Amino acid sequence: MSLPARFTPVRRMVTNVTQALKAVVTTSEAHGYDSDQWVRLIVPDSFGMALFYVQTLIKVTADDEFQTNINTTSELPFLTPVFPPGFTTAQVVPISQLVDVEDR
């Protein structure tokens, strides 16, 4: 019996989140995530839109973009703050991985 490789989450910086019934998130580089994967969004209120540790299932739409199940229509627009270095960046962290049961 072989076990799958250890899960190592790949955090990515968030550069945009749309105001939509199913918000679309853009990352600063290719994220490498898969559709039907769970992620956690961390967007401090200094970015206008505040999403504190919100978990969502995603649908990948591009190498650096994915759609969420989060309704952000009532949130403020996502804006990159102009602060001195040291503020917390907006980020996404995967909290699950897809595993093929046959590989176990």
Image (cartoon, helix red, strand yellow):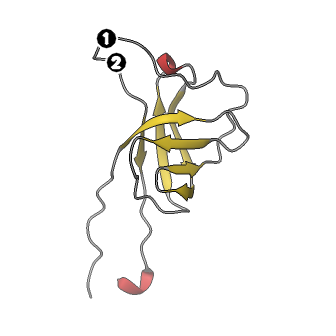
State the image coordinates of residue 80 (x, y, percent, origin top left): 47, 22
Residue at coordinates 64% horizontally, 21% vertically from top-left? 76
Indicate the quadrant containing the N terminus: top left, top right, bottom left or bottom right: bottom left
Indicate the quadrant containing the C terminus: top left, top right, bottom left or bottom right: bottom left
Residue at coordinates 53% horizontally, 22% vertically from top-left? 79
Residue tagged 2: 87
State the image coordinates of residue 46 (x, y, percent, origin top left): 48, 16
Q: Secondary structure at mark 1?
A: loop
State the image coordinates of residue 78 (x, y, percent, origin top left): 57, 26
Residue at coordinates 50% horizontally, 21% vertically from top-left? 47
Residue tagged 1: 84
Q: Is residue 95 above or below residue 15?
A: below
Q: Is residue 17 above or below residue 58?
A: above
Q: Is residue 1 left or right of residue 41?
A: left
Q: Is residue 99 above or below residue 14?
A: below
- Label 1: how many residues lie within 10 Å, few (<14), some (14-19) or many (20+)? few
Residue in front for this viewpoint, 33 or 53: 33
Indicate the amino acid at tag 2.
Answer: Phe
State the image coordinates of residue 35 (x, y, percent, origin top left): 54, 62
